[in-house]
Image (cartoon, rainbow, N blue to C red):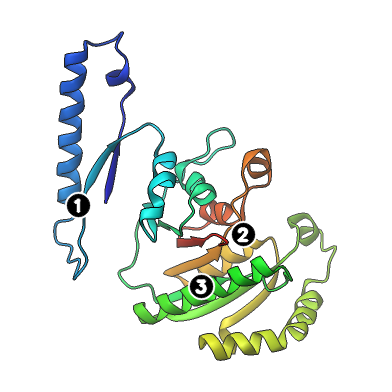
Amino acid sequence: MVGFLFDDMVENAELIPESTARQMKAAMVRDKKAWLQNALEGIDPGEAKIRQTVVWTRDISAWVTEHAGEFGLVVKSGNRSEGLVHTPLDWQLLRESKVPVMIVRDRLRKRPGRVLASVDLGSTKAAQRDLNRRVLAAGHMLAGQLGAELHVVYAIPLSALAQDLDLVDRALMERKTVRKLEEELAAITAEFDVPRKNIVIKAGPPERILDGRASKLKGTLLVMGTLGRKGLKGKLLGNTAEKVLHLNRSTVLALRPL
């Protein structure tokens, strides 16, 4: 469990003497450690051992990216302050972290009744198909551990403009896709124990489809893959996982390609 701290004034030697800065930093670290300890009160970790540490850094994402290899999962509370110029920490972690990232909603039910796995069944790329299997496997495992019901959704990419202007027959596109994927859908049902009625295929902007499905199911833990676009392309086009975070308040577990 890591608590992060940084204060520009403490690091500015022109504003305060070095001795005062050291005292302020030490006091802030003590307060953060006390906060972490208080946050753990009443939590039974079972056989797990919880180690607490306080890190003084301006760049949280860089620290997490550097140390994430020591762990199997990064868990963070959600931050909804995204903008075009400022990339929030949630988005940075999704783009940079080499291990799975879970962004937890503000008010999480103790036991989500449903786990929703988002897959891209239309891709023929080996990396994407491998990522699909990892997403389904993670969803199946979590559903089993939580005693939850597993649902699967495939969003056929369709631009918002085409959808809003009725330029494409969505229903026909969905029916054709279902017929084309019957064998694959049957394999998913058999291998991951997903009732066929729990597998939904819809055409539209993926973030809208996922938001709508997650909202309908309620109390959902959403498992999905993310390619983690970076740079200008990432800022302008974004990533589906990031768009889902902006629209929906479900807890999201994002897996990167291996």
Compared to residue 71, the image places residue 229 above or below, namely above
Q: Which residue is mark 3?
A: 116
- Locate residue 256, reporting x and y percent: 54, 59
Residue at mark 2: 207
Q: Residue furthest right?
A: 167
Quadrant location of the C terminus in the rendered image: bottom right
Q: Are marks 3 and 1 in contact (CB under 8 Å)?
A: no
Give coordinates of residue 76: x percent, y percent. 37, 52
- Is residue 194 something that shows in the picture? no
For disc 1, the marked residue is 39
Q: Residue at x 65, y 66 (%)?
A: 127
- For disc 3, the neighbor class at 10 Å (few under 14, some 14 to 19, many from 20) is many
What is the C-alpha distance between the residues marked 3 and 1?
Answer: 29 Å
Question: Element type at marker 1?
Answer: helix
Numbered disc 2: secondary structure? helix
Q: Residue furthest top?
A: 14
Q: Amino acid at mark 1?
A: Ala
Mark found first going from the N terminus, 2 or 3: 3
* Few, some or many residues within 10 Å of mark 2 (<14, 14–19, 20+): many
At which x and y percent is residue 161? 78, 55
Mark nearer the viewer, 2 or 1: 1
Dot 3 amino acid type: Leu
Residue depicted at 51% across the width and 73% down the height = 116
Tell me if mark 1 has few (under 14), some (14-19) or many (20+) residues whose alpha carbon lies within 10 angstroms of its own: few
Marks 2 and 1 sit apart, C-alpha to C-alpha, by: 33 Å
Residue at screen point 24% across, 11% down: 16
Pinpoint residue 165: horizontal percent, then vertical percent.
81, 58
Amino acid carrying label 2: it is: Glu
Q: Is residue 137 visible?
A: yes
Q: Is residue 193 above or below residue 90?
A: below
Q: Tell me the number on the disc at residue 55.
A: none
State the image quarter where residue 199 is shown: bottom right
